[in-house]
Amino acid sequence: MKIAFDVDVIRDLGITRMVHQVAEWGYKYIEQSPHPQINPFYKHPKASREIMREYKNALNATGVEISSFITVYRWSGPDELRRQAAVKNWKRMIEIAVEMGVQVINTELSGNPNEPEICEEMFYRSMDELLPIIEREGIRVEIQAHPWDFCEQSNETADIVKSFRSDNVKYIYSAPHTFYYDKGVGDVKNMLQYAGDDLSHMLIADTMNHTKHCRYIVNPPGVDATIHQHVAVGEGEVNFDALFEALREMDFANRTYKVGGESIISAALFGYPEKMKYQAVETRELIERELLSK
């Protein structure tokens, strides 16, 4: 199992300092979330020769590796021109991953929950074009539901993943999205077990249950807002005892897949950059304690 740190919270440090900071916190792997100089949200990947040379040099200097890239594109529409642009972005991102020796790209369903049928159709249209390339290049694409995607539920998203029957398409569970995944119930163990053998990646962070009264206050009342957090374990309401118990029962730490190798678990803490100097280390130690030493 690769324990990675999602560098979104420190991306402003610059490439070299960002990599060195991850190493100083004791991580061997970086989860490269959208970065304006590499793989920006929704836009065409940048990743100039100079930036990627700097990145490779920093990796070589520290011994850190990239476990995975995160891409977020509008590949599920609902606008067809944006979908076509997203597929083009995807193709370029696959090239960059191959260049960097990274076998895993994780992503979101995207789309719009108010147009789920159209967005699902467009998602499959995009995959019809991309899956042959993904399989040819030996990439493992991991898909999660994100709040405000065309599908927000965990089990339904796992069904979408399983529908491809491909070793190159797997499922990612994001703990801070738990209360969107089953409409506020928060039954993490059930959802992880449902994903089963297709679960290849975990994102670790906590969040409050947005379905509970006054967990968040939004004005005017009833406004159509999608709210969640990525805070340290224990600062929210996700049942991490049940989550880690389920992962141990599934032997998640020892999983290896035909494509992309080991399972991945990433610290995805975004809310408080000023706390990272100790929360990043505490999260890594928690993962090691719960999954590697029991």
Image (cartoon, grey):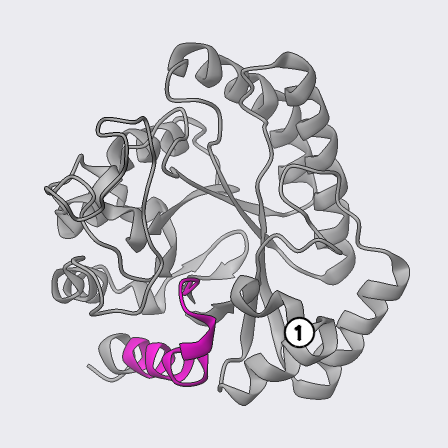
- Please identify the quadrant where the N terminus is shown: bottom left
Horizontal side of 123 relative to 238 (left or right) equals: right
In x, y percent, where is residue 162? 37, 32
In x, y percent, where is residue 53? 85, 69
In x, y percent, where is residue 112? 44, 22
In x, y percent, where is residue 62? 67, 86
The quarter holding residue 290 reads: bottom left
The residue under label 1 is: 13
Residue 65, above or below 47: below
Residue 230, above or below 88: below
Asked if the magenta segment contains residue 238, the reply would be no
- Please identify the quadrant where the C terminus is shown: bottom left
Q: Residues within 10 Å of mark 1 (few under 14, many from 20)?
A: few
Looking at numbered disc 1 in the image, what kind of residue is underneath it?
A: Leu
The quarter holding residue 21 reads: bottom right
The foreground one among 139 and 15 is 15
The foreground one among 249 and 23 is 23
Horizontal side of 11 relative to 99 (left or right) equals: left
Give the farthest residue toward the right. Answer: 49
The foreground one among 238 and 70 is 238
Q: Which residues are magenta?
A: 268-288
Instruction: Name the residue: 25% across, 84% down.
Output: 293
The foreground one among 13 and 74 is 13
Instruction: Name the residue: 11% across, 43% down.
Output: 212
